[in-house]
Image: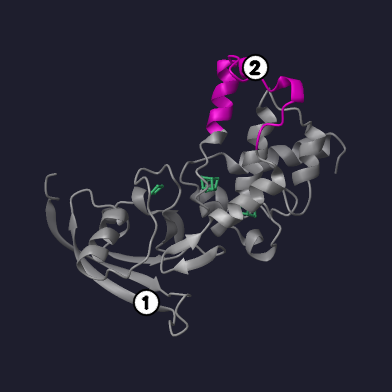
Amino acid sequence: MSEPVATGRKIRLHILRCNPADPASVPHKQTFELEQSEGMTLFIALNEIREKQDPSLQFDFVCRAGICGSCGMVINGRPGLACRTLTKEVGPEITLAPLPFFELIGDLSVDTGTWMRGMSERLETWVHMKKDDVDFKRIEEPMDPDLAEKIYELDRCIECGCCVAACGTARMREDFVGAVGINKVARFRLDPRETRTDADYYELIGNDSGVFGCMSLLGCHDVCPKDLPLQEQIAFVRRKMVAEGMK
Ligand code: SF4
Ligand code: F3S
Ligand code: FES
């Protein structure tokens, strides 16, 4: 592999650090200075810090390509994906903190999985087919391309947690399913194999833990790294429920 091309420019990362597993650990900011290389992302910068300056620094990465959703963190006050963020776009002084709302594992690493799983189980985010529909021929039936496109659009959610971390309602209501949950319901509602009805969906999210708990703060929509139409989905469900006299 070729060596990264140095730009001669210094950047400074101010990282909020804390290790809940260590009772003596006190939250504090630590500053690391390094030279920015050409095309450097926060993923590259954090790895360089861990390799050359502090092996104890905790953060999560899997895919490095904006697909796995594991590198969400607060970058200069805004939730985002570290692997998709160029240091030259947010530097030279960069502040990093773990996503709020989720359980802190250590430094920049949080447990989004437990919350996402709980939300998915509550909303049953999978296709509910009739018993006699469960055969592979039906599963592989070709879908109308326009509909497939619409489903694909909503399926692009990577469960990074940025929308939940940016949402004031989620901080106030433990049972709030977040824009991610509402988006998932919208996705399964479109699926032609699904047997749940609109009324079933409205029962799940047509309440204060769903669309009517949302205060339209729009943080979710602003920070979603996949640019999902979150605000449209929330507004659509609300309008439908009012139009159909369900609210
Ligand atoms: Fe992340 Fe967007 Fe999915 Fe929220 S909706 S979890 S911000 S990809
Ligand atoms: Fe939260 Fe998004 Fe609603 S930020 S309050 S879910 S518009
Ligand atoms: Fe997978 Fe960033 S490492 S989304």
Label 2 sits on a secondary structure element that is helix
Looking at the image, residue 191 sits to the left or right of residue 222; the answer is: right
- Asked which quadrant contains residue 204, the reply is top right
Of badges 2 and 1, nearer the viewer stands 2
Specify whether residue 71 is painted magenta: no
User: In this figure, which colouring scheme has been used for the structure?
Assistant: one colour
Q: Which residue is mark 2?
A: 138
Q: Which residue is mark 1?
A: 29
Q: Quadrant of the C terminus?
A: top right
Which three-letter amino acid code belongs to the residue tagged 1? Lys
The answer to whether residue 111 of the structure is visible from this angle is: yes
Depicted 146 relative to depicted 30: above or below: above
Give the percent coordinates (x, y) of residue 90.
Answer: 32, 58
Part of the protein shown in magenta: 126-153
Specify whether residue 152 is painted magenta: yes
Residue drawn 31% across the image and 54% down it? 43
Give the percent coordinates (x, y) of residue 32.
Answer: 26, 71
Which three-letter amino acid code belongs to the residue tagged 2? Arg
Q: Quadrant of the N terminus?
A: top left
Q: Upstream in the sequence, badge 2 or badge 1?
A: 1
Give the percent coordinates (x, y) of residue 125.
Answer: 66, 40
